[in-house]
Image (cartoon, rainbow, N blue to C red):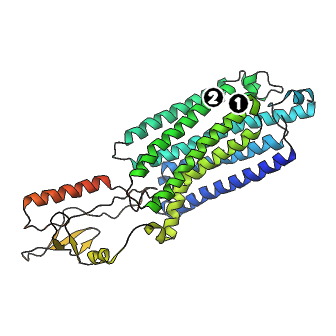
């Protein structure tokens, strides 16, 4: 099955644009890391998702090259009866080479999108550390691993002998259609993406963040729906007889590219928040009372309706004057510890401290402690679901 010049030109323009944006996102991610983690901790201390995304550059680039070689290299053993009738030694040689590129494209596609899945799972593992959702992440990790093994088995066994993948004309239908392999890959790929959304979106909905910032993050995660749609359309144009055409390659590359975007955009968003601090405060209400409280003002206890003075408070502990004039007392442990940036992703907690007068009765004190503990267990993000590098 051949393509016309207009399709070829449009395909090259689109894939080049998608590839350029994908590489730019990965480069921004790695440049962000090179300005922080690598210099401070050494390159060997990079996080797992950074290493996975670094090696994904190879597969993503190989996917771009192979897809364009298929279109501009004379085609493959994906042929109509007319193509078979008009086959010559020259076109046969070109199609053999194109068929090998198809094989490379399928392999690089799997390695690209599964690399993106691993990156997202690593991020989810950090977000759910200590939460009950961690068990769901473990289950999805196992499913993704099983899916990858199943896809690789289908890849090497669907067409036998293996050289049949580049036979022209194809010695078997499976050697040009990849039908059995495509079914296995599509089922595990789409279902794994759905699982990733089902784990990630509830975490985002429950996050205590302003609507403006939540909408941005929902937009990023919502791109996962496009990835699923592209994967389905790719299989439709590659397997459904009335629609079989090289159009499947368009959706093939769109799926891979948007997967790369979704994986890197959370980090890019964090980079923009660092460059433009106003983005980090977007949607949060600031007022004079918050400033006065941080400078020795007073805070009203919501339980008793009373106000207590707040004394000096530093990042390594809390210090306040005793009522009996015995001087300052130092807390036994750090209230807010200075974070050590030994990870590419940090999840900060928003903690509310209630300062209670010693003269208060024990019942009120216990209630205040309970409220503080409850706030600590539920607030787990700094400025929202922030991917802080």
Q: Is residue 76 above or below residue 306?
A: above
Q: Which mark is residue 239?
A: 1
Q: Is residue 237 left or right of residue 27?
A: right
Tag 1 or tag 2, which sits nearer the N-term?
Answer: 2
Whether tag 2 and tag 1 are in contact, CB under 8 A, the answer is yes
Q: Residues within 10 Å of mark 1 (few under 14, many from 20)?
A: some
User: Which residue is labeled 2 in the image?
Assistant: 183
Q: Which mark is residue 44?
A: none
- Viewer-side residue, 380 vs 322: 380
Q: Residues within 10 Å of mark 2 (few under 14, many from 20)?
A: some
Measured from the top left, where is residue 249 in percent x and y?
A: 73, 41
Q: Alpha carbon of mark 2 to alpha carbon of mark 1: how far?
A: 9 Å
Mark 2: which secondary structure?
A: helix
Residue at 12% across, 68% down:
357
Mark 1: which secondary structure?
A: helix
Rendered-image quadrant of the N terminus: top right
């Amino acid at each position: 099955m051949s393509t016309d010049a207009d399709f070829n030109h449009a395909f090259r323009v689109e894939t080049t644009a998608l590839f350029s944006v994908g590489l730019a996102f990965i480069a921004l991610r790695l440049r962000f890391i090179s300005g922080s983690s690598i210099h401070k901790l050494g390159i060997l201390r990079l996080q797992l998702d950074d290493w996975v995304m670094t090696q994904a550059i190879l597969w993503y680039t190989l996917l771009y090259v192979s897809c364009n070689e298929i279109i501009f290299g004379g085609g493959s053993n994906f042929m109509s009866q007319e193509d078979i009738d008009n086959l010559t030694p020259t076109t046969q040689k070109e199609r053999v080479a194109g068929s090998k590129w198809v094989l490379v494209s399928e392999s690089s596609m799997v390695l690209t999108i599964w690399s993106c899945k691993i990156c997202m799972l690593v991020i989810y593992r950090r977000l759910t550390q200590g939460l009950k959702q961690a068990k769901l992440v473990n289950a999805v990790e196992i499913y993704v691993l099983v899916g990858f093994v199943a896809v690789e088995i289908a890849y090497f066994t669907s067409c036998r002998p293996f050289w049949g993948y580049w036979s022209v004309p194809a010695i078997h239908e499976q050697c040009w259609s990849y039908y059995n392999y495509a079914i296995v890959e599509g089922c595990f790929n789409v279902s794994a993406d759905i699982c990733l959304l089902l784990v990630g979106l509830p975490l985002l909905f429950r996050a205590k963040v302003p609507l403006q910032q939540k909408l941005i993050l929902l937009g990023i995660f919502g791109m996962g729906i496009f990835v699923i749609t592209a994967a389905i359309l790719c299989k439709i144009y590659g397997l459904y007889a009335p629609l079989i055409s090289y159009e499947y390659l368009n959706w093939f590359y769109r799926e891979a590219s948007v997967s790369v975007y979704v994986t890197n955009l959370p980090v890019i968003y964090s980079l923009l928040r660092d460059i433009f601090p106003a983005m980090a405060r977007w949607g949060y209400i600031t007022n004079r009372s918050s400033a006065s409280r941080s400078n020795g003002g007073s805070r009203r206890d919501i339980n008793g309706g009373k106000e207590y003075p707040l004394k000096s408070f530093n990042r390594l502990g809390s210090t306040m004057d005793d009522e009996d004039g015995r001087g300052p007392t130092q807390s036994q442990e750090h209230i807010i510890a200075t974070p050590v940036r030994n990870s590419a992703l940090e999840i900060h907690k928003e903690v509310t401290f209630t300062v209670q007068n010693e003269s208060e009765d024990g019942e009120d004190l216990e209630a205040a402690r309970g409220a503080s503990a409850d706030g600590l267990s539920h607030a787990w993000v700094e400025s929202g679901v922030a991917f802080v590098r």
